[in-house]
């Protein structure tokens, strides 16, 4: 079956303008909802300690207790800034 659309009393210019208006409105909606994705920032233990104003041993203890999620590459340990910020809870 072929899908056929017939347009009566419509010029090619009117059709083109109509299509462009539809595309423009969809782009405007996308712009409203679009949030550019920022690259994840990884912090060392020392940077987390400095950020939270605690000793490195405290960062290590919080990691062992599961309060901070750690990520590693080789012998290095890193923390995602977003996860560190989420770990801070309102009292």
Image: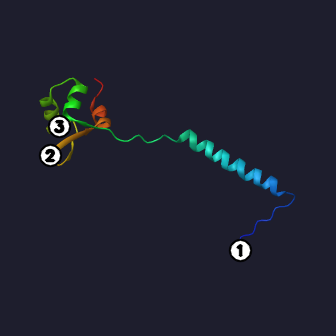
Find residue 88 and report its image quarter.
top left
Residue 14 lies, with reference to residue 86, above or below; the image says below
Which quadrant of the figure contains the C terminus?
A: top left
Please state the horizontal and vertical placement of residue 59, each as a whole percent of the image: 17, 32
Residue, disc 3: 63
Which quadrant of the figure contains the N terminus?
A: bottom right
Residue at 15% in and 30% down: 56
Residue 2 is labelled as 1
Please state the horizontal and vertical placement of residue 69, each as a whole percent of the image: 23, 40
Find residue 58 and report its image quarter.
top left
Horizontal arrangement in the rendering, residue 64 relative to residue 84 (left or right)? left
Residue 38 lies, with reference to residue 51, above or below; the image says below
Residue, disc 2: 75
Residue 89 lies, with reference to residue 70, above or below; the image says above
**Secondary structure beneath disc 3?**
helix
Horizontal arrangement in the rendering, residue 90 relative to residue 23 (left or right)? left
| Crowdedness near tag 1: few (<14), some (14–19) or many (≥20) residues, C-alpha within 10 Å | few
């Amino acid at each position: 079956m072929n899908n056929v659309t017939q347009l009566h009393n419509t010029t090619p210019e009117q059709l083109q303008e109509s299509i462009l208006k539809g595309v423009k409105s969809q782009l405007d909606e996308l712009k409203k909802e679009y949030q550019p994705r920022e690259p994840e920032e990884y912090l060392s233990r020392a940077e987390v300690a400095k950020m939270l104003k605690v000793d490195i041993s405290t960062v290590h203890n919080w990691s062992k207790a599961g309060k901070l999620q750690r990520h590693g590459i080789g012998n290095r340990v890193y923390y995602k800034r977003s996860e560190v910020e989420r770990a801070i809870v309102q009292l």
